[in-house]
Amino acid sequence: AQTVTQSQPEMSVQEAETVTLSCTYDTSESDYYLFWYKQPPSRQMILVIRQEAYKQQNATENRFSVNFQKAAKSFSLKISDSQLGDAAMYFCAYHRIRSQGGKLIFGQGTELSVKP
Amino acid sequence: DSGVTQTPKHLITATGQRVTLRCSPRSGDLSVYWYQQSLDQGLQFLIQYYNGEERAKGNILERFSAQQFPDLHSELNLSSLELGDSALYFCASSTKPGQGFRNEQFFGPGTRLTVL
């Protein structure tokens, strides 16, 4: 069974600085997708960034980028120029390709606080 | 706004009772997923429906059941409620199952269930 692990329950960053959130996963599949979701205090789940496992190029979305290391099964999220609005719980998620069901498997989450 | 609606937003009930949570997917989305978010279990997949048929089952208790109707809205029924069922229940929708990152799941705002 696939598992996702986020080893940092809490992280803190100064406004305008850069922070990296860690995620590791375990799977025997070769094709899959990885996601980072943001959950602000409103509790809404918001997709931040996605990565296809077959792509070597790391995904970027504005101030958000990932460091995808397939062999190491590592998928970290880098937030540059952190803003107060980035404060939230961040979840790493795994999604199998060609799965009969497209369920997401989530990590435990990392609570990010941003200091002004 | 993801386009996925869930009602009610909050639900407070007593142990032993039965409740129904409702979800309307985004227009055109055929798949509906239910997730449970609790402090001790984190975010867990419960069940998926695609165009009215059950496609995948996760850690869903026998006391819980779901269905998807011809108009594609879905209901999650929770019965014989226990204190431990208190959680945030999310519904998500997507177009086709197992289509990888193009199968982005759009989350509703969730229903907060409190069992007293």
Image (spheres, grey):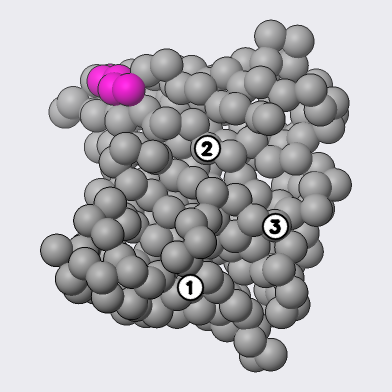
Q: Is residue B43 above or below residue A71?
A: below
Q: Residue B46 lies in what quarter of the image?
A: bottom right
Q: In the figure, residue A89 lies in which quadrant?
A: top left
- The residue shown at (81%, 28%) is A29
SS of the residue at dot 1?
A: strand
Disc 2 versus disc 1: distance between alpha carbons?
A: 21 Å
Residue drawn at x 63%, y 86% is: B69
**Whether label 3 touches label 2, CB < 8 Å:** no
Residue ID for mark 3: B56
For this rendering, which residue is in front, A42 or B69?
A: B69
User: Residue B31's x, y, as percent?
Assistant: 68, 68
Q: Chain of mark 1?
A: B
Q: Please identify, in this view, whether the residue under mark 3 or under mark 2 is nearer the observer.
A: 3
Q: Quadrant of the C terminus of chain B?
A: bottom left
Which chain hosts label 3?
Answer: B
Horizontal side of A77 relative to A81 (left or right) equals: right
Both marks 2 and 1 on one chain:
no
Q: Amino acid at mark 1?
A: Leu
Residue B94, given in percent of the width and then of the height, sits at 67, 64
Q: Nearer the viewer, residue A114 or B64?
A: B64
What is the three-letter code of the residue carrying label 3? Ala
> Do the residues at discs 3 and 1 belong to one chain?
yes
Q: What residue is shown with label 1? A: B76
Q: Earlier in the sequence, mark 3 or mark 1?
A: 3
Is A10 covered by the magenta stretch?
yes
- Tell me the chain of label 2: A
The magenta stretch is A9-13
In this figure, which residue is indicated by the disc labeled 2?
Answer: A106
**Would you say residue B113 sits in the magenta stretch?**
no
Residue at 44%, 26% in the rendered image: A79
